[in-house]
Image (cartoon, coloured by chain):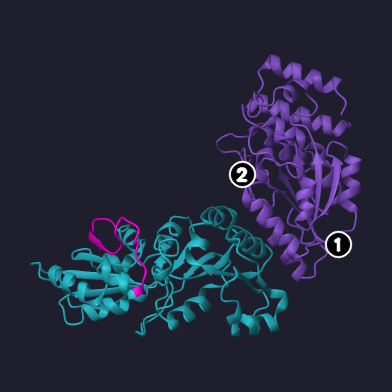
Chain colours: A cyan, B purple
Amino acid sequence: MELAAQDDRIALILGDVSVYLFSDFQEKYPDRFYNMGICENTLISVTAGLSSQGFRPFVHTITPFITERSFEQIKVDMRYNGFGGNIVSCGASFDYAWDGATHHCYTDLAILRLLPGMEVLQPGSRKELDLLLRSRYNNGQATYFRLSDHPHDIDVPVEFGKGVLLKDRGASVTVMTAGPILGNVLEACRDLDVNLVYFHTIKPIDKELVRRFKNTKILVIHDAFGLYEAVCEVPELSVSYHGLPDAFCGWYGTLNDIRKKIGLDTVSLRELIRQKAGAPGKR
Amino acid sequence: MIPVCKEIRQDILRISRSSGHGHIGTCFSVVEILHAIYGVIRHDPKNPSWEERDIFILSKGHAALGHYCVLARLGYFDIKELDSFGAFMSRLGCHADRHKVPGVEASTGSLGHGIGLAVGMALALRIKKSGRRVIVVVGDGEANEGSVWEAVLVAADLKLANLTVIYDDNRSHSRGLQICNPAEKFAAFGCEVAEVNGHDVGELRTELVKKQGTVKVVVAGTKKGAGCRTIEDNQYEWHRKSPSDAELETLLRELDEKTI
């Protein structure tokens, strides 16, 4: 709302979700608010078309539908054409655990980072979202903001494209993570002898920070794909991944139920990190 | 056939022969459509990014060669550049790149994208209270894509009176999924609809200059390969074929004989 009041190039395109959250916006700026319906391909194309004429549009709907379903629209209409737009998703990873595998989404970061010039962000907290959104919405690029219903509440420095070194103990194992799962990861490794690096920008990944730990064993812990692949862009690393299995997570329940099932709860993570940290050798 | 449209077809044949590329049939079906569009829109070949220009998008990107031939004749670039069509370092690919080709507003090729972009552009211009308009050409084969119908639904819901869709009904779809009674379908989606002979520049122009109350779809009855009997009668063979020297001679002769 604050941004929309300052910048009349902001337009909001909704895919029939979160509509009531924006009723104030709709009332104040009716010509810049569109609940366009459940047609994600067209939502992206229209957003790109608005951007081509100087607008700074935001398009918002559920993660798998706006990213996986509309991947080619993002590729062609936004990136190949060079028309920008801010894609803001809701329902990250297992936020909608109970809705099953059609509503789980963990490939979005990984596939979008493959598109040339795409900016891929996973703000893990409200502060990160607020600062990243303000700093990036206006650049005319295609930028993806992956929102979660389960943000962490850890206060970390926020600068686009910069990772955050949360723990540097000179340890031989470095844990790297991104997004809301930081809450579990930080708790799991609180007194263990590991370094901890956190990212809210998946693309461009902070290669300089990754490179600092190339002589350690890097363990990427992430409840999605994308961060591991981004970290692996830095050559000559020793990296392993703990996160999603190569299988649909065919369970329901809650986010925590699924995190526990696939070993992303605090207890499982602590055990895993303890085993890794027990390995000999210092950097 | 009016002389300029015959000349455009001659260019298309000549370039297809020399380059070994080009969907001649789909290019031929839109020659009059393209000629009519550039006759009604505000544009400036010497200043392709003129801020007051109207916007034309060729959503059926396979007809890029036809579009290039029209743009070159209008003066967007030197007609000699057509000879580079499809070559490694050419600006003129078999599907157009808007970053490279003056006068091309959107890079298309994958079907069902240009129309969604056109809806966004038309919406943007309406929000800005601009008098500029958007015209987009969609193919009937392209209309197999669900995204075309999504975009039309959204355009009708938004009542975009500054958007005109020309539906090139050249019966491409007869090879696969048939779109029967397109005019009825677009009307049922909430569009204004007109049906014209897509090879009659006068009919097209008349519909393109009429005032619209909402998004308008001009269903243009056309023939793939219009102007050359050999292509009209052998559409499968000529969907993506470049003529030999002997075939080029035949096709050019047919162009001279044929009247649309």
Q: Nearer the viewer, residue B243 or A267?
A: A267
Residue displayed at 24% across by 56% down: A236
Image location of residue B116, percent across then percent down: 66, 56
Q: Is residue A244 magenta?
A: yes
Question: Disc 2 marks which residue?
Answer: B109
Q: Which mark is residue A140?
A: none
Q: Are marks 1 and 2 on the same chain?
A: yes
Does residue B37 appear to the left or right of B89 in the view shown?
right
Subunit under mark 2: B
Where is residue B18? Give x, y as percent.
65, 25
Q: Bin the neighbour count of mark 1 within 10 Å (Cα to Cα): few under 14, some 14-19, many 20 and up.
A: few
Q: Are marks 1 and 2 in contact (CB under 8 Å)?
A: no
Residue B134: quadrant of the picture: bottom right
Residue A52 vs B72, above or below: the answer is below
Which element is circle 1 on?
loop
Amino acid carrying mark 1 in the image: Gly
Expressed as whole percent of the image width and height from the top left, the position of residue B152 reads 71, 56
Residue in front for this viewpoint, B213 or B106? B213
Nearest to N terminus: mark 1 or mark 2: 2
Horizontally, residue A176 falls left or right of residue B45, namely left
Which amino acid is tagged 2? Gly
Q: Which quarter of the rendering shows the C terminus of chain B? A: top right
* Left/right of residue A79 with respect to residue B188 in the rendered view: left
Q: Residue at x 73, y 35 (%)?
A: B171
Q: Crowdedness of circle 2 by 10 Å Cα count: few (<14), some, many (20+)?
A: many
Residue B81 visible in this rendered orientation of the protein: no
Residue annotated with mark 1? B213
Q: Nearer the viewer, residue B57 or A185?
A: A185
Chain designation of label 1? B
Residue A253: x %, y % from top left: 36, 72
Q: CA distance from mark 1 to mark 2?
A: 30 Å
Which span of residues is magenta-colored?
A: A235-255
